[in-house]
Amino acid sequence: MYHLIVSTFAIFDNVALISTIKKLKTLRKLKLQVQISVDGYIARPNGEMDWVVWNWDDKFKKYVFESTEPVDTIILGRKMTEGFVSYWSEIMTKPDDPFYKFAKKMIETPKVVFTKTLKKSQWTNTAIATGDLDEIIKLKSEKGRDIIVYGGASFDSSLIKAGLIDEFHLFINPAALGNGMTIFKDINEIQKFTMIKSTPFDCGIVELHYELNRT
């Protein structure tokens, strides 16, 4: 049902591949977790994240930490990886930081970076993938626990367009940007979701948890 033409992936016109896509709900879950504004942007035009709520209340911290516990693989686009790894590596040097436990999880969890340009990983505990769609399917077919993706925007958009995201964890921040980076603009047919739950937090964030309907 889903088109397999995605902006950062090769184009596949393969009956076996399409059949595999339809069976994705039987494979490892791929979860998207993302901070997003009330008007649907995940960053300002130049990638600024100064609108995101970072003074998380204890309930939200606990929720985020617990939601990543079933995850044993992180996938990232190349553009996001450097900042992601350097940020959490810095937190790892501060045992008293409230995000230390989460940073430890982010750094110690194996990561796969999807890139068309790099041939060798620059980061520890990180493997390189060429960016082809079949590598996502292969990863989901392997034994293991859940997979999570954080970004960046174009990488998320490609996965959404291809129908590869199983669960959406949208952290709605109390801010409207008016313009910026979005992750749903590339879809060319309707995708419908099932609401699993909606959870408000005292810090102002509301999490919307959806699953993609696969019919």
Image (cartoon, helix red, strand yellow):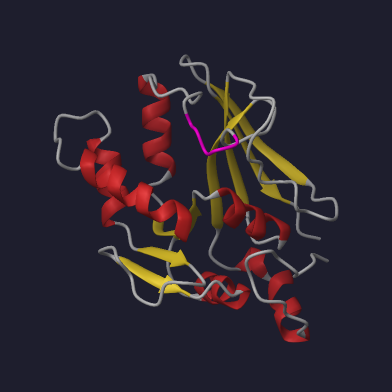
Q: Quadrant of residue 136?
A: bottom right
Quadrant location of the C terminus in the rendered image: bottom right
Is 161 on the left-hand or right-hand side of 111? Answer: right
The boundaries of the magenta stretch are: 45-49
Quadrant location of the N terminus in the rendered image: bottom right
Q: Residue at x 28, y 63 (%)?
A: 123
Is 12 within the magenta? no
- Residue 133, how many percent across, how many down? 62, 73
Magenta: predominant secondary structure element?
Answer: loop
> Which is nearer the eye, 186 or 56?
186
Q: Quadrant of residue 5?
A: bottom right
Q: Residue at x 28, y 65 (%)?
A: 125
> Which is nearer the eye, 105 or 197?
105
Can you see residue 183?
yes
Q: Residue at x 80, y 67 (%)?
A: 3
- Residue 207, how many percent across, how many down? 57, 30
Where is 172 relative to 203, above or below?
below
Where is 10 relative to 98, above or below?
below
